[in-house]
Image: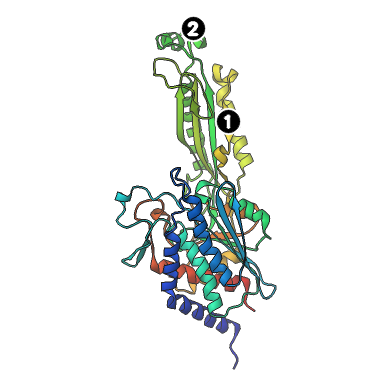
Amino acid sequence: MPATNGERDQAQAATIAAAVEANVDRLISLTQNLIGCRSDSQSLNNPEFESEALRCQDIVANWLDDLGFTVERWQQPPRYPVVAARLPGFGDGRSLAFNGHIDVVPGGDRAAWSHDPWAGEVIDSKLWGRGAADMKGGVACALMAAWVLREVDVRLAGDLWLHIDADEEVVGRSLRELLKRVPPVDAALVAEPTDLAVLPVEGGLVHLRIEIEGRESHAGNRYRSIHAGGHGASAGVNAIEKGIRLATALQDLERQWGNLRQHPLLPPGFNSIMPGMVAGGPGGGHDGQLRSISNPGTSPDYCSLEYNIWFLPGETLAGIQEEIEGYVADVCRLDPWLRVHPPRLTWKLRDIYFPPAETPVDHPFVTAVSQSLASTGVSARIEAFQAASELAWYAERGIPGVIFGPGRIAQAHGPDEYVDIEQLTSACTVMALTAAGWCGTH
């Protein structure tokens, strides 16, 4: 009796899993080679970033070229190398992109590490080093998944893409540019660390600056501005105190958000309005910077508040802007000074903006990833990413996707970053199975 489709799928899955297991050393070596490139994009004192990022992308590009991918490379200004690679399908199956970034945060204080952050040491069944979790481990899994598919002679019916950039940690524009250059895909898997959970949802993020104008005056005049019968604004207006008034009001709005608007996969209160930077003082200011350094003896005429704002899937930046600007305007109408001297709001501060992403949990691609994970013996956990990722830019173009990869976000960006070898193996297997299941085989 001939094998059924289900039996053939099971046999193929077993073959893929066995091939990954038999080549764990190759996967480890690849991850170590990527970690060995000191591609930290945030350090101002890392003049070698460009050459190290190029070296890392050389590893990526050469690996894919050897597998028969068509590889396109370019330099995203000012210094970020990009790789977009396509393995053409043998039929009319659905296309898939694996996404990752090869830049990392700085290694930090070497004395805080128990292991060399750039060596990729393997100790206690863990691979240690900067980027092991975030996210050179995930990139290595994607590369190795493509290698395994060729090794076991699985010919995909749809195109397989790898979208690898080098400026995610500095919120660069590489992936946005890449998605303008290449054909759209039918789904994307972003290999950020998720502890092997399947994450089809993340909130939106935007940074905001609020600048408040005051009026300078000698501190000896303060009593005239704060007591009844005094001189009011003519005796000075403390911009910092006006900023505190606005900050307190926005805390009230934040509480309203948490109580009234929630998402089933995100914790209550995730949508938040967090003040993260404050600057204030006399002598004026601009763009969040004071023009001079003085002392508290003069009533400050400038205050800047910078906010990190998370909002929910289904909400838009335009809607968030309208709501916050309206709320601030309402507060200002109740204040004689702010009514005449309204604050200045600057959105997308330093180009920080990520639209929210939400692929329905019953979407076929979410199902495909979940089933691939289940075939390894792990029940899929469907969760939300409580940070921002490049899934946002796929979602902006209407491309469904999930975040899925080895490692835990709690292990990223600190000393002694690591990824479990077992998670590397599992993630690589799931990626290969997902490509076969989603793209189909010929």
- Colour scheme of this structure image? rainbow
Identify the secondary structure beneath mark 2.
loop
Q: Residue at x 67, y 72 (%)?
A: 93
Judge the density around disc 1: few (<14), some (14-19), many (≥20) Cα neighbours within 10 Å. some
Q: Nearer the viewer, mark 1 or mark 2?
A: 1
Q: Which residue is mark 2?
A: 231
Q: Residue at x 40, y 55 (%)?
A: 130
Q: Position of residue 150 (x, y in %)?
A: 56, 76
Q: Quadrant of residue 293?
A: top left
Q: Position of residue 360 (x, y in %)?
A: 59, 59
Of the pair 342 and 71, the residue shown nearer to us: 71
Amino acid on which disc 1 is placed: Leu
- N-terminal of the pair, mark 1 or mark 2, is 2
Amino acid on which disc 2 is placed: His
Q: Position of residue 307 (x, y in %)?
A: 50, 36
Q: Residue at x 39, y 18 (%)?
A: 296
Q: Is residue 108 above or below residue 363?
A: above
Screen quadrant of the N terminus = bottom right
Label 1 to label 2: alpha-carbon separation: 29 Å
Q: Residue at x 67, y 75 (%)?
A: 90
Judge the density around disc 2: few (<14), some (14-19), many (≥20) Cα neighbours within 10 Å. some
Q: Which residue is mark 1?
A: 345
Screen quadrant of the C terminus = bottom right
Q: Is residue 360 visible?
A: no
Furthest residue to the bottom? 1
Residue 178 vs residue 258: left or right?
right
